[in-house]
Amino acid sequence: MVLDQLLSERMVKTGLVGLIAGLAVYWLMHWRKTRKFPPGPLSLPIIGHFYLFKSTLLHEQIYEWTKKYGPVVSVAVGPFKFVMVNDIDTVQEVLVKKSTDFANRISSYSSDLFTDGGKDIALGQYGPTWRLHRKIASKALRQYMQGEDLEKRVHIALEKGIDTLKTEKEPFDPALHITSIVFNIICALCFGESYEFEDPEFRTIIDVEDSINEKLQSGLFLEDFIPLLRYFPTKNFQQFSVLVNELKAFMKKKFDEHKYSFDEGNIRDFTDHLIQARKEAEEEGKEDILEQLTETHLIQTLLDIFQAGIDTTRLTLRFALFHMAQYPNIQEKVHKEINEAVSGGRLPGMADRVNLGYTEAVLHESMRLAPVAPTGLPHVATCATKIGDYEIPKGTMVLINFWALHHDPHQWDEVEKFKPERFLSEGNKLGPKPESWLPFSAGRRVCLGETVAKPELYLIFAGLMQRFTVKFPDGVIPDLTPKGGMIVLYPPDHKLIFEDRSLKS
């Protein structure tokens, strides 16, 4: 028995020594192959850097590593390795100076399910089809969501939302109310429709959208790197598939309704614009263009605009409202500015924007402190290239740490302080955009809806601030630490009180 125990202990020790030696050899060989690759902590086989992650969010953890490894850090999450860029100089190199080198997106089993094989704009591969759809979508957004058209759509949805908010007499979480306002704006753009707050279709689609985001936040699906599971999918992936198909079915239903009622002499909205683009290609006999404008492509483009128009806008507004409740002195300055600039009881419009610099600066500061897409969508190298002196092989995934840009003490003084003045120039006017403020990214893959999102956010936020004072319930000490992960940051769940300012003497 004693001899067996000694032999057993010796075998365990020998095995451990062998394992450690094997890992050391693996790491040394891997390091020699990639010694010109960006640096990062020691990555273990299979688990990558999981053993080093703390309780902080991944983008914050990686930013901490820049203190040791510099602004460009290589990271392994399980079997996947990527590069994270964390300061404005290298971000400008990746997104602007070498924008074509990093213009591709990742392609995975789950993303192909969502995009019907990459037929959308957000995750589509850089090339002729992507450029065509982006051009069509950009033209439609300029036509239907600028100037008076944008203001009209926002004001209609905002007035309906304000009426609903006024019915709440007790503290409540405003998430669904804000979502309803944003949902009606994007539905007016895409479908020429509006939904009531209690409409079951509105509630269903938002539940689906929220559930999809929750699934994506959990990280990579096992099916993405274990092909066998695609034939025997996990319960998590089965649920994801059902949700995705439900959302795509909603888009197809709306597209089909427009297709059957389409009138070339009366282009009503974004969906009609997409249908018209295909009909023009048919009339001109452009077969190569028609192959890029299939119904699946068009529905995917519609889905891109719909999702992007809802998610980032509603989350940004929720953060801004919580910040106003947290800083009542700043909210009071916003109220004062709106009172002086906007008269007659009308909602703030685009013409008032020049006189509401502090109000918009508050919104920008909220977006700095709480970027709702902290790393944006992944970029992929289209060719072998470099970031600084580091070699980046073709196909390498590169992420931009926008959260790090917005919290860089070399770019922002008093980085954790809510300080709208940092965005103002002389005369309390909104100043030039700071270089390290990039909530919409930059370069070739810059957010398609940036030119719409900025004025839309301004109109909604200014309108809500004109009509309400927002407060936390008495005795509540709020913790505004964001939830979520690299893909999306969510505001915490808090109840607010909306005081109707029109009732004040």
Image: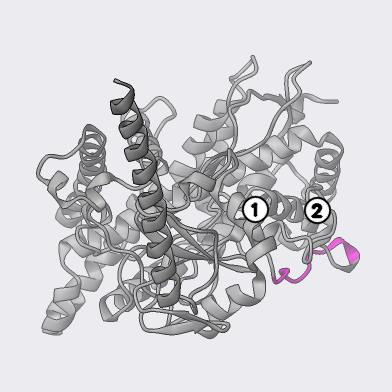
Q: Residue furthest right?
A: 427
Residue 70 picture location, percent across and down = 65, 68
Identify the mark at residue 458; answer none if there is no mark.
1
Residue at 72% over, 27% down: 478
Kindly indicate the quadrant of the structure image that contains residue 331. top right
Residue 8 falls inside the magenta stretch = no
Mark 1 closeness class: few <14, some 14–19, many ≥20 residues within 10 Å: many
Q: Which quadrant is home to the N terminus?
A: top left
- In the image, is 95 to the left or to the right of 496? left
Mark linked to residue 138: none
Q: Residue 62: which quarter of the image? A: bottom right
**Residue 238 in the image: above or below residue 372:** above
In the image, taking residue 306 as reference, residue 360 lies left or right, namely right
Disc 2 target residue: 420
- Point out the stretch of residues depicted in magenta: 427-435
Disc 1 versus disc 2: nearer the observer: 2
Could you tell me which residue is drawn at 34 percent across and 60 percent down? 270
Can residue 156 be seen here? The reply is: no
Q: Tell me the element at label 2.
A: helix
Depth check: give the residue in front, 65 or 440. 65
Q: Is residue 156 above or below residue 424?
A: above
Tell me which label, 1 or 2, sits earlier in the chain.
Answer: 2
Callout 1 amino acid: Tyr
Cβ atoms under marks 1 and 2 closer than 8 Å: no
Q: Is residue 20 visible?
A: yes
How far from the left and from the top, in percent, is residue 91? 59, 73
Q: Nearer the viewer, residue 399 or 284?
A: 399
